[in-house]
Image (spheres, coloured by chain):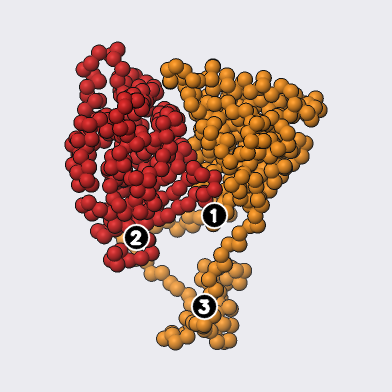
Chain colours: A red, B orange
Amino acid sequence: MFPELNNLLNTTPEGAEQGKLTLLCDAKTDGSFLVHHFLSFYLKANCKVCFVALVQSFSHYNMVGQKLGVSLTTARERGQLVVLEGLKSAVDIFFRPQEEPHPLQFLREANAGDLQPLYAFVRDALEPVDCGEAAWRCPVLLVDDLSVLLSLGVGPVAVLDFVHYCRATVCREWKGNVVALVHDSGDAEDEESDVLLNGLSHQSHLILRAEGLATGFCKDVHGQLRILWRRPLQPTTPRDRSLTYQYKIQDKSIFCCEPSSEPYSL
Amino acid sequence: MLESLLALGGLVLLRDSVEWEGRSLLKALVKKSALCGEQVHVLGCEVSEEEFREGFDSSINNRLVYHDLFRDPLSWSKPGKALPGGPLEALRALDKRTGSGPATIALDSLSWLLHHLPCPILCQTLHALSRQDSCPGDTLPGEQVRVLGLLHEELHGPGPLGALSSLAQTEVTLSGTMGQASAHILYRRPRQRPTLQTQWFSILPDFSLELQVEPLLESQPPSDLHTPSVDPTTHLTFNLHLSKKEREAKDSLTLPFQFSSEKQQALLRPGLGQATSHIFYEPDAYDDLDQEDPDDDLDV
C-alpha cells in the first residue's frame, strides 16, 4: 500500500472504516495502482479479502503486491485471500459439465443474464464462519474491474444489481467493504459505461478518480487524483467533501501534491 | 419550501445527480409529512432500512413504514428474504395500504424501479398510485396521496425522463454552485400555467431545511485601473485618418460597378468628353462576315 494515499484518505490499516463502498475510477490513464493499493491495504489490515481479478494474472498482482509489502501467495495459503482469476476461469468454464455452477456462468449463455453465480461465489468466499480461531477483521470484496463485465456482454443494470447485492451482504450485513474499479471511457456515445459509472457513483461512499492531465503526458506528473467523499456514515460530518491532488507513481511509493504547487518542489 | 412541495399532492419528482444528491431532501420531505401526522410508506430499493431511518427521531420513525426492497430485491438469497412478487407487486401493494387517510409514499428510488420494470408499466402504476384517475373534485382532502419519487437524472435517457416528468405535479431539479445547493421547482397546478421557482437551501443534520440566499457570484477581478489603456493607433508609420477634403472626395466617388441613372445616360449617349475607341479588324480568308446585327431578333 502507499502510505501517502492513506494520509490523503485519513485512514490506516488499523483504523479502517467498515461498511463502505469505495469506487475507483480512471479516465485517460491507468488507475490500477489504486487496486494494488487497496489490495495490500486490506491484507495488512488483517481483513478477509475476496479478489475478483478479471484483468491480470495472479502472478502479476503477486509481483506488485510484493513491492508493496504483501505476499498474495502466503495470504492465499493461510485462507486470508480468495482469488477468482478471471483469465484462467474463463477458459475452464468450457471444459466442465454445464450443470456445475460457475461464477462466470454468463459466458456460456447466449444472453448474458445476471451475475447471481458470481454473487454466490463472493458470498461463499466471505461468509463469516465461527470456527473458534482468530477471526479476520472484516470481509472485503475487491473487483478489478467491472468494465470488463460490460465488454463481456453483461448489461450495466446486471452489473449494478451485482454490486447492489454485494453492498447489501458484504457492507450492510457483514460490516465489510467493497472496492471496485470502473473505467470512464470519456466517450459520450458509450451509454452503458456512463450508466454503470453514474449508477455506482450514486451508491458509493468514497470515489477516487484518477485522471490523465488535460495537457497530455508529463514525465514528472502522471495524473490527477480526485477524492470525493459522499454519503457520510455519520449525519453530522460534512457532506460531499472533495480534494484534488496531482501524483507521480514511483516503484514503491507515490508522490502527491496540490495542483497549484510545482512538482519539482517535492 | 417543504410545505409548498407537499401541498399539491400527486407525484413530486426529485431529480438529482451524482454531484447534488437528493436523498437528504427526500428525507426532509418525509420528516415534514410525518410531523404533520401522516403515515409515510417508504419503498426502499437503494439503501438499507437502518441507513434510511438514520437521523430521524423516534416520533418520526414510528410513523414511517419501510418496505425493504434493498436486502433481496431479485430473490437471489436462499432462504429468500424478498418481498413476495418482486418490485412490481411491492409497488402495487402500496396502493392498497394507503387506503384511508392522507398518506405519503416515498420511492427510493424511481431510478431503480425504472431499471427493473418496463417504463409504461411503471408510469401506469405511478398514475394509479397518486390517484390521478379520479377528478380533483371527487377526492376528499383526507384521501390525498402524495408520491415522492427520487430520480437520478444521469441514468436514464430522455424518453423515460420525459414520461415521468409529464406525470409529475411538482418537479424539483437539484443543482447548485460554489458548494450551495439549489432546487429549481416546477409547479403544475391544475387549470393554471406551470410556474417555475428557484430556491437555495441546505439540509441540516436532523433533516430540517434551511433556506439560503443566492450566493453572489464572485465579481470579476476589477479591470486594472492603474495601467491606462493603450491607444493602438498612436505611433504608426502610416496614416489611418482622413482629412475633411479626403473624406468628401471619398464620399462622392462612384464605385465602378454601381449602376446609377447618370451612368446609364452616359452609356446610352456617348458624350463629347468621352474618348471614343475604334476597333480595327483584319478578317482572315476563312471568316464569314455577316453584316446583319445578330441582336435584331431579340425582343428587348
The disc label shown at residue A262, or none: none
The disc label shown at residue A257, or none: 2
> Residue visible at 31% across and 61% down?
B284
* Residue A70 pos. (x, y %): 22, 42
Q: Are marks 3 and 1 in contact (CB under 8 Å)?
A: no
**Which residue does the numbered mark 3 point to in the structure image?**
B224
The residue mark sitting in front, 3 or 2, is 2
Q: Chain of mark 1?
A: B
> Residue visible at 65% across and 45% down?
B208
Q: As displayed, is residue A190 above or below residue A123?
A: below
Residue A211 visible in the displayed image: no
Q: Callout 2 environment at 10 Å: few (<14), some (14 to 19), or many (20+)?
A: some
Amino acid identity at mark 2: Cys
SS label for mark 3: loop
* Residue B179 pos. (x, y %): 54, 54
**Which residue does the numbered mark 1 point to in the structure image?**
B179
The residue mark sitting in front, 3 or 1, is 1
Q: As displayed, is residue A239 above or below residue A96?
A: below
Q: Chain of mark 3?
A: B
